[in-house]
Image: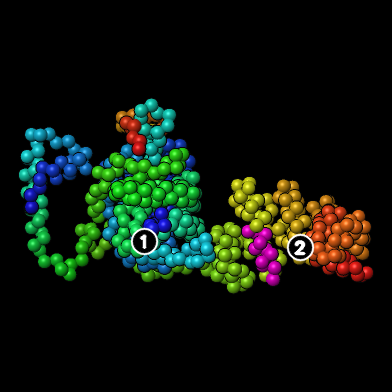
Amino acid sequence: MSNWEVVIGLEIHAQLATKSKIFSGSPTAYGAPPNTQADLVDLGFPGVLPVLNQRAVQMAVKFGLAIDASVAPRSVFARKNYFYPDLPKGYQISQYELPIVARGSLKVMLDDGTVKTIGITRAHLEEDAGKSLHEGLANATGIDLNRAGTPLLEIVSEPDMRSAKEAVAYMKKIHTLVRYLEICDGNMQEGSFRCDANVSVRPKGQEKFGTRAEIKNLNSFRFVEKAIQYEVARQVELIEGGGTVVQETRLYDSDKDETRSMRSKEEANDYRYFPDPDLLPVEIDAAFIASVRASLPELPDQKAARFAKDFALSAYDAGVLSASRELGAYFEAVIAGVGAGHAKLAANWVMGELSSALNRDNIDIENAKVDPKQLTGLLLRIVDATISGKIAKEVFEAMWSEGKPADAIIEAKGLRQITDAGAIEGVIDAVMAANPAQLADYRSGKDKLFGFFVGQVMKATGGKANPAQLNELLKSKLGGGNA
Amino acid sequence: MSLTRHDVEKIAHLARLSITEQEMPVYVSSLSSIVSFVDELSRAETAGVQPMAHPLEGQHQRLRPDVPTESDHHEKYQVIAPAVAAGLYVVPRVIE
């Protein structure tokens, strides 16, 4: 395994969040009853004429600008010819020789914190096909053409990724970007964001790429990772066993966690592209590009850089907090409440307690049961030493389940921290009196027992003793002082 | 340029046309002569000529505002479908 280098390129399909289809006036809303959103253009009736959706073009240009690519002043739609029941015209309108976006790149942060630049060969506009449904029909397939004609942006990377994890990191970054740009809702369950992975292996040090297999239609980050891992292992085993990899299309079966050949696709891979005579070349002038550029939001990398600089956060923290616009906005709302001086505290809470609660309950940050204002209320009580960080976690859980503000919970549960030195000393004295053996051991040099005494006092106070004060007082008392 | 029988079989398959044994020689020779005719174009001097994407030169694609304008007429459209069930077009089973 270690003698092999993995080479991966991804083709990501992002459904553009337009209201109508790319070449027709049919609506694109998800989940409508079958075929109620397919008009004569989508159905491929004779004599109809496709007319290009301006918003789809703007969205493609927006993506191009965000990845620092060149936006083609002139791009051309072509017909990709193949037969399949969910493609009524017998061809898909796509772009071939002259795509709308070319030669961009994206910076991706890997697990070890290093940043890698992944090349993006091109991004082109095309129409989606319909859906084939195989359930509930005996020996037949049902076709729903509501999706037919939905605009897609196909984003094709260079073969720059060297592991399944890198591929996932790149795909996540694209996912983040299209949502920032508001050009795709990124909903993978509904198929709005999916990818094909081109995977090959070559002996380490070899320049020439190995033969690749293309794994089709991966619709979750986890499946991308698992499918690539399986495919790499399959290819290595095949070659080491004296076989050769054949160039083919494969499907990932998530139930069996394996990829298998789609034989039917092998002979069909002759698409006979030619310029679509129904569509004229698309011309994009400087004014159009300027207007799209003016609509660009702050991009993920820009936001991360700003967070790192303004709030003195690590690159990792800044990257996590800018992973979505919503998360970034939440974090900034908390900062506005607690002040930039407590940014690290805010970052830890947003990435820690808040994120785990969201994950545990499987809800989006927009629907978080503790909003930025409430979290601010809690953090301010840590800052002014009303409660310790540990007690705050307990308060947070109560806020999450009861929907009450921090102060109300602190009062109701009597969680206010004990900061009265006399009160803490009283507890320390009692603990010392109750544990004479430990006290003697400590005083004869067993320093580790300090933790035992801290634990005992915390237990006796229900965790409410101010930790810094407790440390100080305990040190002095145990040492025999009479402070 | 002349096409082989194999070429014609492949083209026919890609277009989902079935050609009988008797028709085959006719297609091989007539398609070959079409290709030869088109081949004459490659004698033209085209260096420095930008390929055209469309015969209407100088014109470009008009764009349409992103507004849904179509409503549901699937029952009307499905009248001519060979088979329909629960709003779906029904075709012979296709599954990978």
What residue sits right under mark 1 in the picture?
A204
Residue in the foreground of this view, choosing between A42 and A377: A377
A374 vs A469: above or below: above
Kindly identify the residue that appears in the image at 10 percent across and 51 percent down: B35
The colour style of the image is: rainbow
Residue in the foreground of this view, choosing between A40 and A128: A128
What residue sits right under mark 2 in the picture?
A382
State which tag comes first along the sequence, 1 or 2. 1
Q: x%, y% of residue A55?
A: 42, 57
For the question of whether residue A331 can be seen, the reply is: yes
Element under label 1? loop
Kindly identify the residue that appears in the image at 69 percent across and 64 percent down: A345
Kindly identify the residue that appears in the image at 43 percent across and 50 percent down: A229
Q: Quadrant of the C terminus of chain A?
A: bottom right
Q: x%, y% of residue A238?
A: 34, 47
Question: Which chain contains the residue that carries disc 1?
Answer: A
Q: Give the quarter of the image for residue A323.
A: bottom right
Q: Main secondary structure of the magenta part?
A: helix
